[in-house]
Image (cartoon, helix red, strand yellow):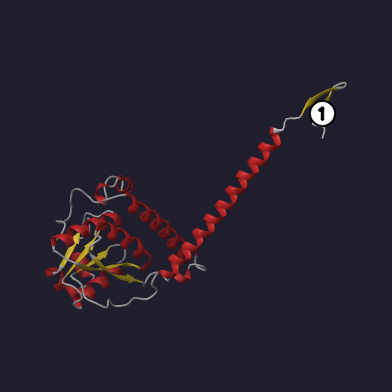
Amino acid sequence: MDTTEAVGWGWTMPESPKAPARRSWTRRVLGLGFWAATCAAIAGFLGFLVFVYSLDRFEQRPETRADGIVALTGGAQRIGDAIDLLDKGYAKRLLISGVNENTSRDQIARLNPGQRRLFDCCVDLDYRARNTIGNAIETRRWAETNSFNTIIVVTSNYHMPRTLAELDHALPNLQKIPYPVAATIDPHDWWHNPAVARVIFTEYLKFLAVWVRTHLEDDPERSSVAHLISGGSPVKKQLIAEPIWR
């Protein structure tokens, strides 16, 4: 085969065999990148579906009692359900973690007037936790202080997987009994309710980030990533309202 081309009047020069090879290599890389991105998108979507349909749609009472109950702030229903569990004797003490520093014990008690007596004996308030990482750290301190071996965890159904991941990392030897509050969001509505889809998909991404982080670090209190996410520290160093627990 002739590998020359005409140049001017009768002059010829060889073709460069490298240009087609470079184009072929570029197409191959782009093709591999496309298929890798497609596979990653499919895997991510399948993971999202598993996440969604693993969430509880209805609340169920715990099948066993525990030493303590931990309720993460973020919704009035969480605290109400946790106090109700305490009132029914499912545990000896309740920790409400992540209380706003401007919210007093009396204000929370007024929202649950039928169980006011429990606030005087059996409810502890944590004002230091800034986020879910801080909730796990303060729960560990509270459980160790009280020598608890089992706790009931009360938070929203969509927030439960990330909460348990943080608690398992901070307290691997403590038994956790989840009590997901399902009053606010039905996860199965995601496909026709954009607001629900946005909340659950955002939580799914956060859960993936927590899963990766907790498998790469030793302790949330010494985690540089946790400090970066929290804008300083997962727990507040100084208290403004009340002592950490009472």
- Where residue 142 sits: x, y (%)? 17, 60
Picture mark count: 1
What amino acid is labelled 1 in the image? Glu
Q: In this view, does 149 lie to the left or right of 232?
A: left
Residue 205, image quadrant: bottom left
Q: Quadrant of the N terminus?
A: top right
Label 1 element class: strand
Q: What residue lies at 19% left-to-right and 76% top-to-bottom?
A: 87
What residue is disc 1 on? Answer: 5
Indicate the position of residue 147 as horizontal and vertical percent values.
Answer: 14, 64
Residue 68 x %, y %: 19, 68
Can the viewer see residue 94? yes
Residue closer to the observer: 40 or 183: 40
The answer, for residue 131, to whether it is visible in the render is no
In x, y percent, where is residue 114?
19, 76
Q: Going by the picture, which residue comes out furthest to the right?
A: 9
Q: Is residue 85 left or right of residue 47?
A: left
Q: Which of 80 and 219 is in front in this view?
A: 219
Frontmost residue, 230 versus 167: 167
Question: Which residue is painted at 14% across and 73% down in the image?
Answer: 117
List the single residue furthest toward the front.
1
| Crowd rating for badge 1 (residues with CA inside 10 Å; few <14, some 14–19, many 20+) | few
Identify the image quadrant of the C terminus.
bottom left
Residue name at image x 50 percent, y 63 percent: 46
Where residue 135 sits, quadrant-wise, is bottom left
Q: Is residue 179 above or below residue 241?
A: below
Q: Does residue 12 appear left or right of residue 29 in this picture?
A: right
Place residue 18 in its image quadrant. Answer: top right
